[in-house]
Image (cartoon, helix red, strand yellow):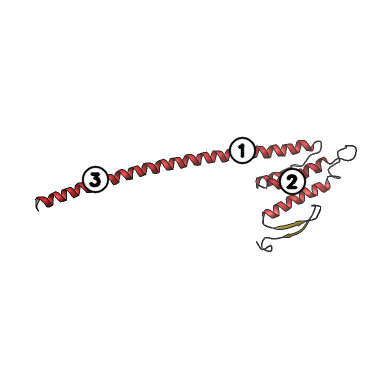
Amino acid sequence: MSDKTAKDWEDRVVLLENENAQAKAREAASEKALAEARAEVAALRGGLEQAKAAEKARRDRDVSDYIEGLKAKALPNAITETELARVRALFDRGDDENARFVGGLLLKAATTSAPGGRVVPLSSGGASERAKADTAYQVAQLRAMGWTVETSADGTQITSKTPPRAAGK
């Protein structure tokens, strides 16, 4: 080999070694950036989980406060634990509107007053409100499962219910 050819090969080897070193430096920088991004994602996930836990705790307090408020407002009559469990089940499903509607009906049934301010026993004047609350709960449960449901004008009875497949869903 001539000196010029050997020199060209040496220059080429040095150039390739430099390019290889630069590629390794870029790879190390990319790995560092990737590790930083993964650490940031992990921190964001941790923050999100904390926020979700805090929101769940706040919601649980709000629901408990609402249920306890129903109990307190219904005094001296009481709303049964079974009925309150229905309200809580609606809240747990995220159906806040129906939960508050059913809760309101139960409260109205428990506090219905007769002329003269006497509290009416639950078995008399509040019966239609209880029927409305029971029906509203049943309607909410059926609709959550995809049923099409219609009620009587006074809301105390289900007049028709169609399963999800028959309703075209």
Give the number of the mark in front: 2 or 3: 3
Looking at marks 1 and 2 on the same chain, the residue that comes earlier in the sequence is marked by 1
Q: Residue at x 16, y 51 (%)?
A: 9
Q: Which residue is mark 2?
A: 101
109 lies left or right of 16 = right
Q: Which mark is residue 18?
A: 3
Q: Are marks 2 and 3 in contact (CB under 8 Å)?
A: no
Residue type, numbered disc 3: Asn
Q: Residue at x 26, y 44 (%)?
A: 21
Give how far apart the Cα atoms at labels 1 and 3 are. 58 Å
Taking 146 as reference, is 108 above or below it?
above
Q: Secondary structure at mark 1?
A: helix
Looking at marks 1 and 3 on the same chain, the residue that comes earlier in the sequence is marked by 3
Is residue 46 shown to the viewer in this render? yes
On the image, which quarter does residue 87 sit in? top right
Toward the right, the furthest residue is: 116
Give the number of the mark in front: 1 or 3: 3
Give how far apart the Cα atoms at labels 1 and 2 are. 23 Å
Mark 2: few/some/many CA within 10 Å (<14, 14-19, 20+): some
Q: Which residue is mark 1?
A: 57
Quarter of the image with the C terminus is bottom right
Q: How far across and down, in percent of the image, does residue 115 sit?
A: 90, 40
18 lies left or right of 135 = left
